[in-house]
Amino acid sequence: MVILLRSVLWGLGLFLAVATLLPFFPGEAWWIRIFDFPRMQLAALLALVFLLCLAAFDWHQRRFWFLAGAVLACLVYQSARMLPYTGLWPEQAVSARQGQCSEDSRLSLMISNVLQDNRDSQAVLDRVGEYAPDLLLLIETNGWWAEAMAPLEEEYKEVVAQPQENKYGLLLFSRLDLIEPQVRRLVEEEVPSIHSGVRLPSGVEVVFYGLHPRPPEPKQDTEERDAELVLVGREAREVDVPAIVAGDLNDVAWSDTTRLFQELSGLLDPRIGRSLYSSYHAQWPILRWPIDHVFFSPDFTLLRMSRLEPVGSDHFPILVELCHQPANEGQSNSPDAEPEDQKEARETIEEGREAEKEE
């Protein structure tokens, strides 16, 4: 029995080590990039294997120290990648103090991947009615969902509708004035995004990007996804107004692509220093990752971020409430791009456009 347990631990330990090392390879193949996602799950398994090694092996044997040492090193690395998304890390986005934000400087945003085949539209309407966001971005919306969400038009004076039957449709509802809203196709013709100015009650103009690039999966590598994020990241830094980027980015908060996006854009991740707010998969508690994001300029402070109650989808909705306070801009730990990041960005965009041409 002990021999069998040791064999299982060797096999599992080897698999976990390979799963930890694969994301180091500079490729966009889906079977490499998919291992960016389950860092929490890999860390839990690594901790279990390490504890079982202590019980199953003779501590005086080299084999024990080799396996246990490798497993422990992988565990430390995986934990370190997730540490910024806990309360043990400094907050990247400054928290707004209640009572110090005027009503006309506030902006609330709700994003929800509704799951195209989901038919619980009333749950979505109930959640919107409960939280009454200023901006509402609905993802995976086809013609059925556009019709089901039509009652929202009584409360939301501005609507940008791009329903599609391929799970990449988008609906944007706004209580605030939208300025020159556009549906764009930055990399892939079948994958739209939304770009619009938004005028706050204070008169301040904000630029909003709503995204839903493709995920890594069999027959779908990440060149196009990465290129779209990099393009938006570079554009968000160049605009001369505050920016918000939101959506189901099909990328986890701790990936190298998200890091590059933040450094190019200079936008803040409210998860850093707070919590993961894992939004997917709503029905599988042990397999959850933070892939629904809201990033914003340093001249916003954070009033609130919440993962909302489920709506029948495989994603939880995410709610963020912001306060435009440009006096706080210098207090945030805003990321910045180095020359090598700019080079990486150019290569990422070229690879994404080449991959789109080949399809």
Image (tube, rainbow, N blue to C red):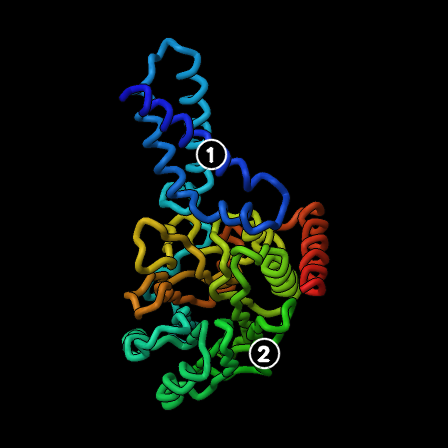
Would you name the residue on which mark 2 appears?
183
Dot 1: few (<14), some (14–19), or many (≥20) neighbours within 10 Å?
some
Percent position (x, y) of residue 303?
37, 63
In which quadrant of the rendered view does residue 59 lie? top left
Please tell me how many numbered marks the rendered image carries. 2
- Secondary structure beneath disc 2? strand
Going by the numbered disc 2, the residue's amino acid type is Val
* Residue 92 in sight from this viewpoint: yes
Dot 2: few (<14), some (14–19), or many (≥20) neighbours within 10 Å?
some
Q: Is residue 120 above or below residue 18?
A: below
Q: Quadrant of the C terminus?
A: bottom right
- Which residue appears at 39% of the width and 88% of the height? 150
Q: Is residue 43 left or right of residue 253?
A: left
Going by the numbered disc 1, the residue's amino acid type is Tyr
Question: Which numbered dot is residue 255?
Answer: none
Percent position (x, y) of residue 313?
35, 68
- Which residue appears at 42% of the width and 66% of the height? 322
In which quadrant of the rendered view does residue 312 lie? bottom left
Percent position (x, y) of residue 100?
37, 65
Would you name the residue on which mark 1 appears?
77
